[in-house]
Image (tube, rainbow, N blue to C red):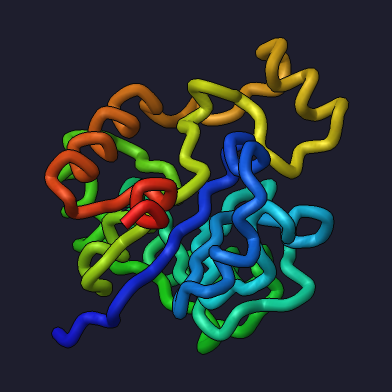
Amino acid sequence: MLKRKEILIIGNGRSVLERSLGTRIDDFSTIGRINNFSINNFSEFIGNKTNIWFNGANQHLKKQKSVPNEVIVFIPPEILRRKKTTIHKRIVKRLNIEMNKYSLIPLETMENYEKNTGIKRLTTGTASILWAIDNFETVVIYGFDFFIESKAHYNDNFIVKWLTELGINKKGKKHDMVKEKLFINKLIKEKKVIQLTDYLLK
């Protein structure tokens, strides 16, 4: 399979607010964003452009007003096994787009992701990185905090942020965030993935 050149995947961690990199981010030919990403009021930090929307069609997914041309959906293997093709009805409803407007990653691929990482129920962020490694020559990432450094998202309002940091609003509890962070750090060490700050220093 012919790989595309490069992709920048922007996570939703609050660390993206530490640097005003919007202009440099928009220079990337392909930019992927995750789940409930926001551009409004944050373009100074994370740019305006979005080419791929990675999401898990989860219960709390917000419908995007402007849907990118490419939409990639990751559903956990245990749900795919149970729902089979009926999962599309849920995806269409939650994304508010037609079935031919998104790509659902197959069960076999999702099983391989879990097998290769040794982690069950991967986050959309980690699944998107694995997908990108298979489809792009260069994978750059930014804003992956793994609910560790900060448990809130950059675009959470004050109340949501406060409740999340107190542990009342529990984000990421279905996932093994420590294992995921260690796995992504391993990919960085192996130079399969590059952090944006390092990439910009090249």
Can I make out residue 36 in this image?
Answer: no
**Vertical order, 18 against 65 (above or below):** above
Q: Percent position (x, y) of residue 199? A: 35, 55
Q: Residue at the spot x=67%, y=40% of the render?
A: 17
Q: Nearer the viewer, residue 182 or 42?
A: 42
Q: Nearer the viewer, residue 90 or 199?
A: 199
Classify residue 186 as left or right of residue 57.
left
Q: Residue at the spot x=43%, y=47% of the render?
A: 197
Residue 140 falls in which quadrant of the image?
bottom left
Classify residue 48 as left or right of residue 74.
right
Q: Nearer the viewer, residue 155 or 24?
A: 24
Can I make out residue 99 in this image?
Answer: yes
Residue 89 falls in which quadrant of the image?
bottom right
Where's the N terminus, which quadrant? bottom left
Q: Residue at the spot x=66%, y=77% of the render?
A: 67
**Vertical order, 57 against 59 (above or below):** below
Classify residue 191 as left or right of residue 130.
left
Q: Percent position (x, y) of residue 202? A: 31, 57
Q: Percent position (x, y) of residue 157? A: 84, 36
Q: Residue at the spot x=55%, y=56% of the render?
A: 34
Farthest top residue in view: 166
**Vertical order, 123 against 71 (above or below):** above
Q: Nearer the viewer, residue 82 or 2?
A: 2
